[in-house]
Image: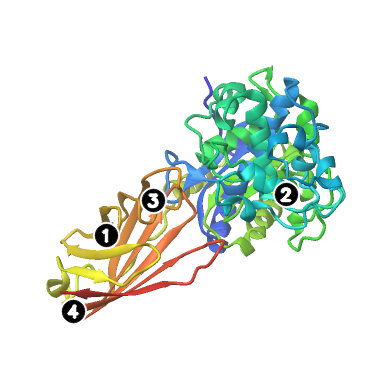
Amino acid sequence: MNDLQRSSPEQQGISSSTILRFVEALEQISEVHSFMLLRHGSVVAEGWWSPYSKENPHMVFSLSKSFTSTAAGFAVNENLLSLDDTVLSFFPEEAPAQVSEHLEKMQVRHLLIMSSGHAVDTWSDMVERSDGNWIKAFLAVPVQHTPDTHFLYNTGATYMLSAIVQKCTGMKLVDYLNQQFFETIGIEDATWEESPQGIAAGGIGLNLKTEDIARFGQFYLQKGVWQGEQLLPEAWINDATSFQISNSDGVQADWTQGYGYQFWCCRHNAYRGDGVFGQFCVVMPEQDAVFVMTGGMDVFDMQEPLNLVWDILLPAMSSASLPDDTISHNNLVNKLDSLNIVPVEGETSSPVVSQVSGKIYGVDENELSIQSMIFNFTESACEITLKSDEVQETILCGYGEWQHSQTTIFNESPLFDKTPVASSGAWTNEDTFTVVFRLIETPFYYTMTCTFADDEVLIEIQVNVSLESTEAIVMMGTYS
């Protein structure tokens, strides 16, 4: 059996009241979708904020890097590659016509510790390359520093690790990890977005359930051992999660503690994998604990959940079990069972409903490629039909509750044709209907404000977080 054990917090040396205080503080500072806390190998607390659920995978963004590093570790253990192998030795046919001295010296270990010698992240050059050859694009970017002398967070370097592992093993990254340890530790149905060359993106693109991330953290906490079997050498785990290179140019405290093999060193002798918008797998060896979180928070707020872990949870972890505390434990259980993100608040109807319901509104040209919209208001929900160049879909928006559908128009992942969406809507003014579309397998949600006047509707759509721009999409719809 691969089920993670469950235990009361008190049995594992931490009070339920402390965890409750932590959860309440976490809710106040960020958009949290899920969390799990493990102590001494047992889950002592876990929760999902509805409409997010334990059954749904979640984009983990750069937390993917730690999994790519792990795949490299398995390949090294099988003697399929070496940290001293040069990057060019795997792709001589992709090398630029003129190979610089720095590029020639670049090794697998330099990719792992983000010291490839580049002065800029190679990722944009890769994804923007017209022929889709990301390997050639990476090798074409000038290497301005001697490898091993300069830390630069470089998602393209992790892609090259993925490409090297695929070349050495003859398997795609997720298939190789399935074979090596996913199946053994109970990670199922992991998916990974790929480049046009059919290679896992490596640095981003992995989609996992919250418990999958927790299993990964526990696997590392146990030094590569699972149910008594040493799957990955302890020496690799130690090297991967310890200080390999300085990254002290950062601003936030836990981003200045050094870097390992695609793992960040943390304060308190902990380490972590993390992804933008609040995806965390924090391993605390001295406390024998793992903290996991998924979310949709602003990138500038990502230090705050870690501060709460250090300030609230870590000092409360006792080396011995605590007395049972039934009242506090029941309070925690009740809180965790009732976690939710409040649906859109407002009225379920408006005097203008009869004038706008069922009408087809043609809309201005926009970046979502929406051509027309229909709002069909019923007593229990609003059905919004969106038509684009390629698809027509209807999304159900609940009043005072989240209704589940699927979407392609708001899809943030090219891996799937459709992505699950939970939607809620309400009349926030007599002439304004507001909808929130939550893409529940991602950090993203879209807020759409529709203001009706005569035969027109002004539509404003804004995403909560983005690496590019969160400026609203504004368009006018006209009924004819």
Badge 1 marks a residue whose secondary structure is strand
**Mark 3 residue type:** Pro
Instruction: Judge left or right: residue 213 versus residue 306.
Output: left
Relative to residue 446, is residue 153 depicted above or below?
above
Badge 3 marks a residue whose secondary structure is loop
**Mark 1 residue type:** Leu
Q: How many marks?
A: 4
Q: Disc 3 to disc 2, how far (Cα)?
A: 32 Å
**Mark 2 residue type:** Pro
Residue 51: which numbered mark, if any? 3
The residue at which mark 2 appears reads as 315
Residue occupying image coordinates x 61% and y 24%: 170
Task: Tell me where residue 430 sits by quadrant.
Answer: bottom left
Say which of marks 3 and 2 sits in front.
Answer: 3
Please state which of residues 470 and 443 is positioned toward the viewer in this rendering. 470
Task: Tell me where residue 219 sits by quadrant.
Answer: top right
Q: Earlier in the sequence, mark 1 or mark 4?
A: 1
The residue at which mark 1 appears reads as 386
